[in-house]
Structure formats: structure tokens, C-alpha cells
Image (cartoon, rainbow, N blue to C red):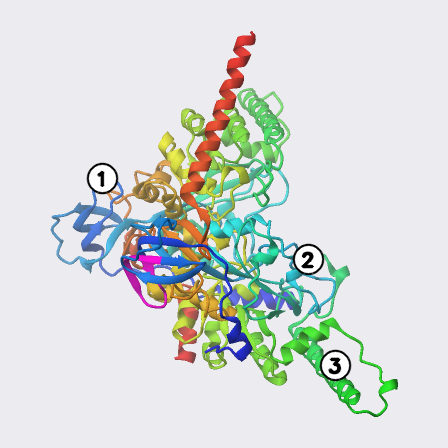
């Protein structure tokens, strides 16, 4: 499923990474694509995986990481977060399709560091759910310390955020009736999205007519172009298939209504966000080849989340839906692997299936599964190393690597911490001593 | 009107899902061939547990099975004592955004008169979920203000509050200011120092002592006037008398030191909750003999400069210092995650067995109920979990669960809804 639609997109997958060289030795490699390799090595050249297998010899003087006794896995991918952004919701208006998260990317947000301490190497960082139609999301790699420009993943799908239910209808805003905004019901949410797409169709036709008229030689001097409308431009991209919908939804009924809207206008939904009632309509979602990006068990924080059962991920996986576990949080992002493991208890997934929920599945949803999401020759060397099996509750991320470059190293962190503590202690003692001498 | 319909549908949702444990036909239960993790002492492979009248009648490797006993073949399973959640909102909190269903936080700053158990809803949909993950005992706590109210100890089964209550008033809860979570690279500070709040507390204790004196004097001498009734002071009396422990929510290094001094000066029995920076003053906590309950580890470290794992390694450091500790979920909707907080601490230096003790025998010791629960031993209450793996692991499934020797129904709103919609999809 989710085949790339355009040849152009496929061409983009020819990687242009400028990464590092690295040799990881003797790890238990969970490739996600081709099973587990015991005592395996991974050779990374220029940020890409060159070779995977036993007893690999790298070039001389290559930086080598000993992973004996540890688990080497693909860097984790979070299909839905809001990290690294200086803003998430444009709430003055209901429709804000013109805003772009690209414009507010903040590479210095410490949540990016938090993410790498939990083995996360990529995230889809999104507009909030305050608007029926929000803004354009971005996919970033969590290259802590790099500039915003260097974080971007241009190969990923372009996605626009939609939201249904309690948030866009503002039902949990108490005592703020002065800022009453249309829509206030699910009827209104659906109607306003339909309105905007009808407008967009009209807008596109205006431009088509204008262009046609411009081409024909008659009356070209008096021709006035239609007004440029950035809100409409984004929706036109949706209708042309250049951008896909990522839709925040909770209840089964509203989810189905949105599928109907997408058919009415012919735009593509790549993934539903939260989808706490997906298990109720698993066959409909599976039939449409729409993914779901959901919580493991974070639920009952509002009414529409009160039938969100922890079996959702496991059950929907077995019904053939591409499921990812997301964090939607600058805290939960560092324990995505723990949340994925819960699908083993609730839903009976195997370790390998559970690991897919935070690796290849989100990669598919973001349109980057040809370059990340599993450990395969030719893919980006985005790798996490854990001390125990990543699906164990006792596990810990010890190293996070992006394109062959080490961004988080727990051993180094511990060393730095010790050094710092020593310095603080020494300075304190010195102070004490000098004080004593003076007296 | 909209809201009314809303609430009605929610109530309908709640009822029916909390099936309370089914009654046992046979009074004697024999669990055989289990790997017994008694928590105290060595594990027993291929062990047998005999349960009679709700208690563990016998336990060991070579125990004869009485005739007529209902036998559970636990081959391949591990037997654990039921887990104890040392601070949670089970039965007090249903759906976050619906005030109508939230009863753990009273308004006002000084509320010693409120008791958590008096708002306990036995039909809460969160209780069967926590229970089916191995939790059998919980301290349900009030929150908010300086004096939040009284917590109660409950068993996670029963049709009425009284059937669930173990101790209706366990402790008086004090909340000192929390800490901002670290989100930036700049050093963060505690929201406000607790010292101000501790001055207020000392005043409250002082007033209570005067009130107590006046009452005693009036009681002795009928001609002396009774003091005016003061609700707040009245309900602080058991604390002064030593009948009620204090659970003090305290986080920063300095606040912990101030709280230790307060506890010493007032000569009260106290337990600390939270202690995010406890690792900085572990020896001081140990010397004061104050046990600690850790809050949820699903949180950011309070100070960026202390490192990303300061909350995660906190339990290991306090354990090594010799502090008695317990874990808590501090939740209702995710109370089921209690064992994973313990496992997270184990991932960052805490011995795995110590982590298990932090959700079993240690909380039992802290709450003074270790003669009844917290381990699998002869004579103790038969709160037994049969699991197909390590109980702190997310992938482990609970196969059977007993509270007071009665087998519990492991279904919940999770399984009920799943089964309902399986019928549609399959």
C-alpha cells in the first residue's frame, strides 16, 4: 500500500546524504526488514548503510562502536509530535490552511534533545488540532545542534493538518464564550471543511479559465488575474494530489464522515491522528488504505477519548491497517518504545510487529520508507542502540545515530556528568581552602 | 441540556463494565506448579500455594493439596503478590475534561476535612483495568491546596466503598509547591520556595495545638467555655495526636531539607511524596527516617542541568542510601502503568528485585500493612497474581488474579468494547 504516486517523488529518493563513516560491531541487529542478526555488524559510509552482516571489515581508522550485548535497531520515528516549533495553533480563525510549520521551526527546542535520548531520529512535527483545517506540517530529523535547515526532510510527503471533534469545535474551552467561533458542532466542522473545498474548486477554475484565456490571443490586454489566496493555494495542492491530509479524529462516526468528504472532493487521506475508535471501523479504514497514528493507551482525558481502548494498535494492525504509535508530547517522545511494547500485551503483537509501530510503519506514513525505518543496505544510517531488547520495560537507549553521526551517547553523557560534578566539588573545596588560609 | 445528555450517556457507559470478582464455589484454592516470587526470600520453582478463607494457608515447594480444593495449574506461570499503587486517583477521577467526573481536587487551600474514600466510585471504569494488570491495593489521594485532605487505602474490589476500604483515613496530604519542568536549556527554578508555605503550616499546627489545649481544658473542667468550633483545626487534631500520618508532597533540594526540619520540629510521622531532587539529599532523607513515594516517572526532569535522566535515576540513588521507597502511578486513567514506573527506575540503575519490592512489600511496610499484604507468605491475605512473565514487563499477561482469596474477573471496558466490535469486524 501507499505506493508513491509520482515518478518525481521516487527520483527524490536517490539519497543526497552527506554523513559520516562508522562501523558498529557485534550487536543484536533488529533489522525490521529482514529479521534479527545475532552478533552482527553494520558498516556506514557517508551516512548510508553500506553493509550489514557478520564480521564486516571497514576501512582503516573508521570510527568503531562496540555493541556487544546490545540491541541495534532503526532510529525510531514519531509520526505525530509538535516538537521544535515556536507555535502550534493559529486559533483566531477556524481555517488556517496558509500557515506552515516550516516557518516556526526552532532547532534549539530542547525537546529535540529529549527525543534523541529515547532513540528517536525523525518526527513529523505538526500543526495543532484547534482548527478544522490547520497548517502544513513538516518532517524533521532530530539532529540536535544543527540548524533548522539541516533538520528538514524534503523527501517526505507534504501533509496538511485537519481536525475533527472536540478541539476544533472548542467544546473544552470553559468560560471563554466571548471568543465563540464558528464551528461549535461536528455538523459545523464538516460543513466548514466542505465549504473550503468548494471554494478551492472555484478558485482553481478561476485560475484555469484565466490561464486558458491568457493563452488564447483574444482580449489579453484587459485580462485581470484572479486574486492570489494562500489558504486556497494549500487546498488546491490537496486537490491536485500534491499534498495529503493528516486528520485528527476520535470518534468512529466523524472518521467515516471525513472519508466521505475525501471522496466527495478527491483528496487523499494518508493517515488519521489519534483515531481512538479506529477499532470500531477497522474494515472501512483498512479498505481505504489509510494509516492510523495513535496513542498506546493515553485515554479518557476527554469524552471523545473515553472509548479509546489499549487494544486499538494491536487489533487494527491485525486488521491490516498501517499503525504507528506516536508521542504527541515532548515527554512521551522519549519512551515511544515503551508505548509500542504495550501492543504486545494488548493485541498480542510479536516483538517484531510491535517494533514496526515506531519504525517502518511511521516511515510509510511519512513517505520515507525507502530511506529510513529499517536497517537495510542503501538506507540512511539512522540507528538507535539499546541495552536490552527495545520492547522490554527494562530497556534504555544508549546511543542515537543519524546519518552515521552520533547525536546521543549515554556513555559520553555519564562521563561529562561525572566531570562536571568533579569540577563543582573541586571549586567548592578550593573556595573553602582559600577561605581558611585567609582566616 | 446538551451537557445533561452527555453525562447520562457517560453514566450508561460506566455501569456494567466494572464486574466485581466472581464468587468462588470452593473455599479452598490450590495453585500448583507456579514459580513463586514471594518477594521475601528465595523464589520457589514449581511451588504450591494453598488459599483458605481468603488467606494464604500454606506456601512452598512440597505442599500436599487438600481434597476438595479448587486446583489452578500454574505451570509456566509466575505467582506474585498483588501490586500496591502508593498514590493514585482510582475511583476519584473518570474523564479528564469532564468536571462532573473529577473528585480528587477540592477548592481552597486548607482542606483537612475532606476524605478521598467519601468520593470513591466503585464502578469507575479505571479500576478493572488497573486490577487486570496486577494491582490489588491502592492509596487513593486528594490533591490541591496546601492541605489537600485525607487519603484512604483500598482493595481494588467491592460493590460499595465500604467493601473496598482497608483504612478510610490513612494520611493527611500536604502539598508544597512543585517544580517547573525543564524545557529550556537555561537553569529552571522551583515555582516558589516552600519556606513560605511551611511557615503557614507551622502556624496551622500551632493553632491546632492551642485548640487542642482549649478543648482538653474544657473537657476536664465543665465550667470552662468550649472553644468555637473550627472545622479546619478539628480535622487537624488527629495529625497532632499522632493518629494520622502526613504525606508531604515536596520536590526541590532545599524544600526537602526544610520539610525534614518541619517534620522533626512538629514530631509527626511523615512520608514524602515526589522528591524529584531527593538524590541530592539522599543521606539527609535516610537520616530523618522518612520513607518516600515516587510520583509518576512519566515526567520531565525538573532541572535541565541535572541531566535528562535525573528523575529516572532518583530511585536507585535513594535505594542505595537506604531510604524506604515505593512507586506510584499518580493517575486513574493510567494507574495500570504502575509496574512500568518501577521498571523504568530499573533501567536506570535500580536493582530489578528492588524495583519489584517498590510496588509490593515496601509500600506495605510504609503503610504498616506488611503483616497482611505485599508478599506471598503464610498467613498473609491471598492477593495473588498469576502472570506469564515478569510482572514489570509490558509484554507480560496476567492470567489469574485473586484478591482476598477470590478470583477476579479480568475483563474491563477495554475487553468489553473490543469484544463488542470484534463481532462487527470479524
Q: Is residue B179 left or right of residue A73?
A: right
Mark 1 nearby-residue class (10 Å; few <14, some 14–19, many ≥20)? few
Overall secondary structure of the magenta section? strand
Q: Chain of mark 3?
A: A
- Residue nearest the viewer, comparing B75 with B109: B75
Residue A417, placed above or below residue A21: above
CA gap between label 1 and label 3 equals 76 Å
Q: Chain of mark 2?
A: A
Cβ atoms at labels 3 and 2 below 8 Å apart: no
Labels 3, 2: one chain: yes
Q: Residue furthest front?
A: A60
Q: Secondary structure at mark 1?
A: loop
Name the residue beneath numbered marker 2.
A174
Name the residue beneath numbered marker 3.
A203
Q: Chain of mark 1?
A: B
- Residue nearest the viewer, comparing A56 with A294: A56
- Residue nearest the viewer, comparing B157 with B248: B248
Name the residue beneath numbered marker 1.
B41
Amino acid at each position: 500500500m501507499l505506493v508513491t504516486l509520482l515518478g518525481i517523488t521516487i527520483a527524490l529518493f536517490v539519497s543526497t546524504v552527506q554523513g559520516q563513516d562508522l562501523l558498529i560491531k557485534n550487536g543484536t541487529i533488529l533489522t525490521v526488514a529482514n529479521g534479527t542478526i545475532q552478533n552482527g555488524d553494520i558498516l556506514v559510509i557517508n551516512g548510508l548503510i553500506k553493509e550489514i552482516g557478520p564480521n564486516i571489515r571497514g576501512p582503516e581508522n573508521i570510527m568503531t562502536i562496540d555493541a556487544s550485548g546490545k540491541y541495534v535497531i532503526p532510529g525510531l520515528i514519531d509520526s505525530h509530535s509538535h516538537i521544535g516549533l515556536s507555535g502550534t495553533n493559529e486559533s483566531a480563525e477556524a481555517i488556517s490552511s496558509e500557515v506552515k510549520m516550516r516557518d516556526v521551526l526552532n532547532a534549539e527546542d530542547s525537546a529535540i534533545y529529549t527525543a534523541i535520548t529515547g532513540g528517536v531520529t525523525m518526527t513529523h512535527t505538526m500543526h495543532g488540532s484547534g482548527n478544522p483545517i490547520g497548517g502544513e506540517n513538516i518532517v524533521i530529523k532530530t539532529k540536535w545542534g544543527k540548524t533548522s535547515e539541516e533538520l528538514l526532510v524534503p523527501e517526505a510527503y507534504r501533509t496538511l493538518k485537519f481536525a475533527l471533534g472536540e478541539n476544533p469545535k472548542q467544546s473544552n474551552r470553559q468560560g471563554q464564550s466571548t471568543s465563540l467561533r464558528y464551528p461549535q458542532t461536528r455538523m459545523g466542522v464538516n460543513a466548514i471543511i466542505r465549504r473550503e473545498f468548494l471554494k478551492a474548486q472555484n478558485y482553481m477554475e478561476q485560475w484555469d479559465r484565466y490561464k486558458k484565456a491568457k493563452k488564447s490571443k483574444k482580449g489579453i490586454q484587459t485580462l485581470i488575474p484572479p486574486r492570489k489566496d494562500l489558504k486556497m493555494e494549500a487546498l488546491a495542492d490537496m486537490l491536485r494530489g500534491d499534498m495529503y491530509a493528516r486528520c485528527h479524529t476520535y470518534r468512529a462516526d466523524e472518521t467515516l464522515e471525513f472519508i466521505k468528504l475525501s471522496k466527495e472532493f478527491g483528496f487523499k487521506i494518508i493517515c488519521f491522528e489519534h483515531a481512538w475508535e479506529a477499532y470500531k471501523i477497522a474494515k472501512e479504514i483498512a479498505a481505504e488504505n489509510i494509516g492510523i497514528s495513535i496513542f498506546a493507551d493515553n485515554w479518557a482525558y476527554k469524552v471523545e477519548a473515553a472509548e479509546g481502548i489499549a487494544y486499538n494498535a494491536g487489533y487494527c494492525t491485525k486488521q491490516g491497517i498501517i499503525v504507528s504509535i506516536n508521542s504527541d508530547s515532548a515527554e512521551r517522545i522519549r519512551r515511544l518504545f515503551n508505548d509500542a511494547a504495550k501492543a504486545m500485551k494488548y493485541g498480542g503483537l510479536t516483538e517484531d510487529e510491535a517494533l514496526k509501530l515506531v519504525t517502518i510503519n511511521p516511515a510509510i506514513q511519512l513517505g520515507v520508507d525507502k530511506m529510513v525505518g529499517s536497517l537495510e543496505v542503501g538506507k540512511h544510517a539512522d540507528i538507535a542502540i539499546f541495552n536490552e531488547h527495545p520492547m522490554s520495560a527494562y530497556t534504555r537507549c544508549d546511543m542515537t545515530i543519524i546519518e552515521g553521526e552520533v547525536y546521543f551517547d549515554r556513555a559520553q553523557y555519564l562521563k561529562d556528568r561525572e566531570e562536571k560534578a568533579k569540577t563543582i566539588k573541586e571549586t567548592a573545596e578550593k573556595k573553602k581552602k582559600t577561605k581558611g588560609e585567609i582566616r | 441540556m446538551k451537557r445533561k445528555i452527555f453525562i447520562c450517556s457517560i453514566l450508561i457507559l460506566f455501569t456494567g463494565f466494572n464486574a466485581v470478582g466472581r464468587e468462588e464455589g470452593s473455599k479452598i484454592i490450590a495453585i500448583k506448579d507456579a514459580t513463586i516470587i514471594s518477594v521475601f526470600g528465595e523464589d520457589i520453582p514449581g511451588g504450591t500455594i494453598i488459599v483458605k478463607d481468603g488467606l494464604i494457608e500454606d506456601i512452598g515447594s512440597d505442599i500436599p493439596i487438600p481434597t476438595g480444593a479448587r486446583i489452578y495449574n500454574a505451570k509456566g506461570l509466575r505467582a506474585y503478590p498483588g501490586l500496591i499503587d502508593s498514590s493514585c486517583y482510582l475511583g476519584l477521577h473518570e474523564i479528564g475534561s469532564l468536571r462532573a467526573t473529577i473528585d480528587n481536587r477540592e477548592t481552597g487551600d486548607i482542606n483537612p476535612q475532606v476524605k478521598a474514600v467519601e468520593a470513591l466510585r466503585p464502578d469507575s471504569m479505571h479500576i478493572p483495568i488497573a486490577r487486570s494488570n496486577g494491582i490489588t491495593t491502592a492509596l487513593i489521594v486528594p490533591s490541591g491546596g496546601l492541605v489537600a485532605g485525607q487519603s484512604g487505602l483500598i482493595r481494588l474490589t467491592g460493590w460499595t466503598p465500604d467493601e473496598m476500604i482497608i483504612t478510610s483515613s490513612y494520611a493527611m496530604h500536604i502539598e508544597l509547591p512543585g517544580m517547573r519542568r525543564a524545557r529550556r536549556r537555561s537553569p529552571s527554578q522551583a515555582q516558589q520556595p516552600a519556606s513560605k508555605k511551611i511557615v503557614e503550616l507551622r502556624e496551622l499546627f500551632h493553632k491546632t495545638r492551642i485548640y487542642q489545649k482549649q478543648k482538653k481544658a474544657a473537657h476536664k473542667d465543665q465550667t470552662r467555655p468550649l472553644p468555637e468550633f473550627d472545622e479546619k483545626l478539628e480535622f487537624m487534631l488527629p495529625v497532632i495526636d499522632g493518629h494520622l500520618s502526613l504525606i508531604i508532597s515536596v520536590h526541590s533540594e532545599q524544600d526537602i531539607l526544610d520539610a525534614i526540619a518541619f517534620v522533626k520540629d512538629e514530631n509527626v510521622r511523615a512520608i514524602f511524596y515526589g522528591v524529584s531532587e531527593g538524590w541530592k539529599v539522599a543521606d539527609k532523607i535516610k537520616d530523618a527516617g522518612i520513607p518516600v513515594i515516587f510520583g509518576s516517572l512519566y515526567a520531565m526532569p525538573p532541572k535541565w542541568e541535572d541531566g535528562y535522566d535525573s528523575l529516572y535515576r532518583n530511585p536507585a540513588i535513594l535505594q542505595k542510601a537506604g531510604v524506604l521507597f515505593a512507586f506510584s502511578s499518580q493517575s486513574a486513567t493510567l494507574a495500570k502503568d504502575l509496574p512500568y514506573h518501577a521498571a523504568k527506575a530499573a533501567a536506570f540503575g535500580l536493582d530489578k528485585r528492588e524495583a519489584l519490592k517498590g510496588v509490593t512489600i515496601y509500600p506495605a511496610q510504609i503503610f504498616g500493612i506488611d503483616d497482611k499484604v505485599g508478599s506471598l507468605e503464610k498467613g498473609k491475605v491471598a492477593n495473588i497474581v498469576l502472570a506469564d512473565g515478569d510482572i514489570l514487563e509490558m509484554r507480560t499477561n496476567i492470567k489469574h488474579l485473586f484478591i482476598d482469596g477470590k478470583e477476579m474477573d479480568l475483563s474491563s471496558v477495554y475487553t468489553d468494547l473490543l469484544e463488542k466490535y470484534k463481532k462487527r469486524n470479524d
